[in-house]
Image (cartoon, rainbow, N blue to C red):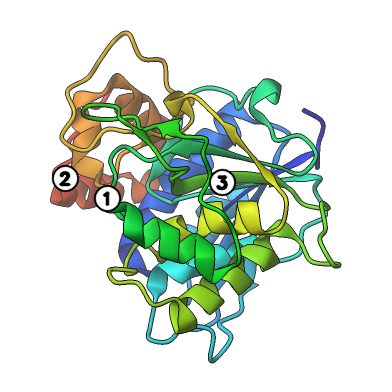
Amino acid sequence: MKKSDVAFYFVVEGARLEQQALFLASTLRDHNQIATLIAYVPETSDLTPATTRFLAACDCDIRPLPQPDGVWKKPYPHGNKIFAAAQPRDEPVSVFLDTDMIACRPFELSALPGENEVAVVPEGVASWGKDDDRWERAYAHFGLEVPTEKVRLTRGRRRLFYPYFNAGMVAFRTHDLVDGQTFGALWQATAQEADWSLAVGGKRPWLDQITLPLAISRFGFRHKVLDDVYNLPIARRAHDPSLNPVLLHYHRLRYLDAWPQGQSAFQSVIARLPSGDHAQFIEDCAATGFRPALL
């Protein structure tokens, strides 16, 4: 991975995401030393000076995230990831990450998407569209046949299901264009159309995950299914030493207590924080239920 080949990007808005951003930026920089890191901040929000300094210490760019009017039928905070996907970047590969993640080892070159591919990890369970009728109507709305290919969900019974992916990690080639538009822009257009005009129920909060496979199919992309170590959810999940995650998706900091990777992530942040900020950071972690040991 050469410098500027890959951009890892995420969204930071509000105190909780600022706290999580410290963990994500620090661990990404530990394991992907020459990649570009980008924190998008919605134009309606501001970072604290301490977070700004910390991200700078991680060599993480801070960029404003436009909040265009009229995109969503009603407010949709999850849509910030789609707005971020649609932003221009110079790096050949863009990797979106939910902010509530930590990097545990390098992102392997073999996991990066090829031409006209979108690299994704299947969702854990069928959180939307358990009834075939919803998917049939969704694909038909865009003039598409329902895919015959199934993917294996990653939790519970690990059932075979329609292409349905966890939108916490989405990687695509930045300069693969359809009618002059990037995949991120095409995803945004698909999500906007679905929000306003697709007559199916329960679209929120799943609109991002519903429209991700729709955008892939609609514009001739292929999905590249990655192992769940590239987006490993651990909420209410006991530590499994047989797993070796690349990206650990913890949802709430307290769930890191059970995983040694959480301790490593804590130490990574402590190592980059000014010593005068340690006490407040430890107090803030404890307030979430995450109480790592001090080495």
Name the foreground residue: 286 vs 257.
257
Location of residue 280 with respect to 267 vertically, above or below = below
Quadrant position of residue 87 = bottom right
Q: Residue at x 33, y 44 (%)?
A: 278
Instruction: Please state which amino acid type lies under the numbered disc 3.
Output: Val
Task: Judge from the rendering whether residue 264 lies leftward or rightward of residue 8; answer left or right.
Answer: left
Q: Mark 2 and mark 1 in contact (Cβ < 8 Å)?
A: no
Residue 197 x, y percent position in the rendering: 47, 82
Residue 225 x, y percent position in the rendering: 55, 31
Q: Which residue is mark 1?
A: 130
Instruction: Please state which amino acid type lies under the numbered disc 1.
Output: Lys
Q: Residue at x 60, y 27 (%)?
A: 107
Residue 177 x, y percent position in the rendering: 83, 58
Q: Residues within 10 Å of mark 3 (few under 14, many from 20)?
A: many
Which quadrant of the rendered structure holds the N terminus?
Answer: top right
Task: Judge from the rendering whether residue 17 lies leftward or rightward of residue 3; answer left or right.
Answer: left
Q: Residue at x 54, y 28 (%)?
A: 226
Q: CA distance from mark 3 to mark 1?
A: 23 Å
Q: Which residue is mark 2?
A: 286
Quadrant position of residue 244 = top left
Q: Determine the secondary structure under disc 1.
A: loop
Q: Which residue is mark 3?
A: 170
Name the foreground residue: 262 vs 167.
167
> Given this view, does label 1 or label 2 mark the residue nearer the observer?
1
